[in-house]
Each structure stands twice: as C-alpha cells, then as structure tokens.
Amino acid sequence: MANELLFFMEVLVGGLLAGTMYSLVALGFVLIFKASATFNFSQGAMVFFSVLAFCGFMQDFNIPFVLAFILAAFLMVVVGLCTERLVLRPLMNASEDTVLMATIGLGYVLEGLAQAAWGVEVRRLDLGIGDFPVPWIADNLKLFISALDITAGLVAAIMIIGLFLLFKYTKIGLGLRAVADDAGAASSIGIPLKHIMLLVWSAAGIVALVAGMMWGARAGVQFALVDLALKALPVLIIGGFSSIPGAIIGGLIIGAVEKILEVYIGPFFGGAIEGWAPYVLAIFFLLYRPEGLFGEKIIRRV
Amino acid sequence: MSDNSVNILDIKNIEVMYDNVILALHDVSLKVPKGKVVALLGANGAGKSTTLKAVSTMLASERGKVTKGSIDYDGNSIEKQNPSQMVGLGMVQVLEGRRCFGHLTVEENIISGAYSRKLSKGDIAQELEKIYTYFLRLKERRKSQAAFTSGGEQQMIAVARAMMAKPKMLLLDEPTMGLAPQLVAEIFNIVKELNQKEGVSILLAEQNTNIALKNSDYGYIIETGKVMLEGTAQSLLNNDKVKELYLGISKKGRKNFRDVLKEENLNKKSN
C-alpha cells in the first residue's frame, strides 16, 4: 500500500516538474497574447530554432556552453527585433486574424531557416545533467525523481520569478502591463508599442530557448520540438489565455494529469496517451469553462 | 510676434476620412491660444473625438486620415508625427471613456503617464506628490486597483496620468461623460486649476454645453463634421440659437443648426 502511494507521489512530482516547462512556454504565449491579442503560432518554431542554434554554436563552432547560450539568447532578441520591424509593424492596424496568420507564416520561416543553417539531423544535447533519479532523494524519501526534471523545475521557477519581478518593478514592465490592459490608452500617454513588442517577443524567444534546451536534453534536438511546444495550447485553454498565474498553474495541471493518465489509464489504450490526453482535457474545458480557470470572462453584446 | 506663438494649436480646414471612404470631418478650423481653455461642442457623432484624434495623431490606429487641410502645433506641422512623439512634444490626449489600466493600481496608472520622460525614482515621487495636490481623492486610493474605483475617480486617474507626462496642451474628450453633477463640477474645478496653475492649454470636447462654456474662454460648435458657430464662451452662452439648441431653452421644434439654416433660407426666399 505504502509502495503504491510512493509510486503515485513519484508520478505526480515528476509530472509537476515536467509541467513547469509547459508553464514556461505557455508564459511565452501569454506575454504575446497580452501585448498583441494574438496567439503566436510560431512559438513552437521559436523553440526549435533557438535550441538548434544553441546546439549549432556549441557543436559546430566549439563555442563554450555559457557563451553559446548568450549568443542564442541574443539571436532570439534579433528574431524579436526583426519580427517587430518586418511583420508586426506593417500589420499594426490589421485585424487580429491577419496577425495570427502572419505568426503561422513566421513559424514556417523560422523552421526553414533553422534547418537550412544547421541541417536536418537529430542532435544530441548534453547539458551535463543526467536523466536518472537523484540518489539523495531516492535514499531519503524513497522517491525516484530524475535530476533533469528537478533542474527543469528549478530553472522554470527561477525564470517565472524573474519575469514576475521584471513586470512588477521595472519601467518597461509597467509599460507592458499598461499595454496589456489597454493598448490605445497606453499609446495616448506615449508608451511606444514597438518597445513593448520587442520586449515580449525577446522574452518569449529566451523562454523558448530554455524550454528547448530542457526538452532537447531529454528527447534530442529535433523537429518534434515544434509540436511539443504546442502543448502550451491546452495549458492556455485550461489556465486562460490572458493570465500569467493561469499559464503557470495550467502547465502544472497538464504536466501532472498527463503523467498520471499515462501511468494509470494508458495501458488500457495501449500506452502513449500523454501525447493526446491534454487535448482531451482541453476539449472538456472548452465545453464547460471556455474562459479557462483564470481567464477573463468574455462578455460580448450582440 | 508671429501668429504661431499666440496659438499653440492651429487647425486649418481639415477633412478626415476613415477607411478611405467614410467622411467624418468636412471642414473644421479652430485655434487654441496658448494658456486658454477652448471648448469643442456638439452632439454624438458630430466629429469632436475625430478632431481630437486628428490632433493627437491617434487617427492612424483607427484607419483614419487627415485628407485635406493642416494642423500646426506649437508652430510646427504634426503631419509626420506619431502619438508617442506628440506626447514627447507635450501634447497629451485623455481619451473618451477614461480608459484606465484596470489591473494596475491607481498609483501605477499615474506613474505610467511619465513613461515618455526620463525621470529618476526620486523625481517620479516628487512629481506624484505635486499631482496629488490636485487630486486629493486619488492619494487616499493610491493602492487600490483602478478597475475597482468609481467613474469619477477613474476620470481623475486618466487626467492625472496625462498630467504626469508634463503636457503643454491637454486634449480632453468628454471628461464628464456619465458622471453625477457634483463630480462634473469637481472635475471641471481640477481642469480649471491645472490650466491656471500649470499653464496647460486645453482643448475640451464636451456634450455638456452649459458647464463646458462656463469653464472655457472660447467655444466652437460642430455638427456633422463642420464648424457651425464659434465665439467667446460668454457670447455663446448668451447666443439665442445656442440657448435653444444646446442649452435646452427651446421654444420651437428645431433640433440643430441645419434646421435653423433651412428655416432662414425659406424665410429669405419668401421675403
């Protein structure tokens, strides 16, 4: 009995830790959604693009880890800059749907560029953190939890706290929150939208890089990362598109639920249900609580 | 001295179109002398907001465009400017409907107005204190979320936020919309005080003709995108047609200046 409980705890904790990565990527979506009311379909491509570049810098040019990370992060700022200048600014007064389509196009461009520059083969990424249970926890708590999961959880937590502090206590953070509430009013008092756009796209890019590194370390840096990042979609449906706490909690829920379902119900379906189970959960939310757990209820007069 | 140094704002015969087809303003000319309060009066849809947005260059974000005429602010054409540049030049618009940042606190809302200025934390605190002397009510509520304040307080937030940008000129779009008479008076007192003590020139769009004229130096009345009448605030308050059409002291069933002009034309013909 006790063993079963321990096993459940193990599954739950592993799921929650994996979920922090979903939270982080969902946060990238929320930032862009708040600033421009658009779902950024290129987020998955950004994950793939950034981490492939990081691997390329390290493996093809023998650049040390830290420097490669800084270069890749800088590259994502450049991507943000180009996106703002070449895609968003010309579409400033276009409808939200147009911008949405543009992000899909941007996704293809990024995928293509990444593969053209670094090749199409799957790359192995070694962060120096093993994907095996931490002995100390295994000995003392009898829980087998992967070191990679723990690292991912910690990194995600640090980044979320960092973003929170950035938004709460800096001038540009205040500007972002103002734009998120009312972009028109923000521009009427002289908050330049282009700076805010650059900030959110750069932040989303760096978040994508970190998530890509964690996922890439486990499953290899490959094209499938694009789809993995789309797991943020059910996260957002559950958490609410415009809510930062929603993204965090939604990510934890998806992470935990998909692992629990995989372990306890998966065998009845022949396994591998974590790929689609979150989307089923999302459908239930869409049916019964479309605004998500923390989203703003949308009231529209007809 | 040239004409420009007297008038901070000079609008000459502008025409405004939305989406290249909808003609919102036909022919609007108006001047705002430095340090004065000018009222722009008219009913819903007359073109008050469009005029203000043409001046603050916020038209572009609503697919509007000035297609004829010119707008000079502080002696320079505003044609090539964008809203944040206009704020930098000291022209700030307070949009219709208050438009506070609901999730931000009252104080954060006000501080956000200083975004375009390069101020240190100390400078901001100092500016805040100065602003609070005009908006005592807001100081009490500084830590509340703006969405949970009353309509009057939200209007004060919107004006206080604009004042944080240290404007030379304020464009106020219906600051008293939907407010109780007592609050209307309070808002106008603050506006008057800002005008006198801070020397801010003000262009005020209002439907509330009576109180707007009582607090202004000069007034323009527009209908369907055209200036129908202008004059000093006092002369407009005493004008029979204004009394009849805008102050509700009516004898006949005439509703606007167009009806009046039609009648006058008929009279001329019959004479």
Image (cartoon, rainbow, N blue to C red):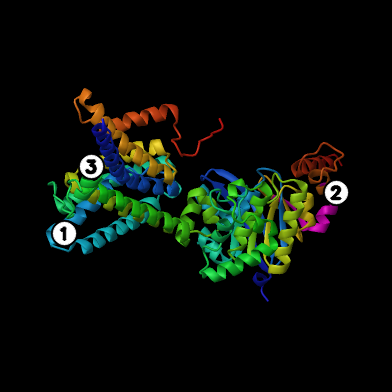
Using the image, tell me which numbered label, if any, was put on residue A185: none
Residue type for callout 2: Asp
Q: Tag 2's secondary structure?
A: helix
| Residue B191 visible in this rendered orientation of the protein | yes
Q: CA distance from mark 1 to mark 2?
A: 82 Å
Q: CA distance from mark 1 to mark 3?
A: 37 Å
Q: Residues within 10 Å of mark 2 (few under 14, many from 20)?
A: some
Whichever of callouts 1 and 3 sits on the residue coming sooner in the sequence is 1
Residue type for callout 3: Lys
What residue is at 73 percent from the left and 63 percent from the top? Answer: B193
Residue assigned mark 3: A142
The quadrant of the rendering that contains the C terminus of chain A is: top right
Residue B92 percent coordinates (x, y): 59, 60
Using the image, tell me which numbered label, if any, was put on residue B240: 2
What residue is at 77 percent from the left and 53 percent from the top? Answer: B185
Q: Which residues are magenta?
A: B227-241
Q: Is residue B238 magenta?
A: yes
Q: Nearer the viewer, residue A25 or A118?
A: A25
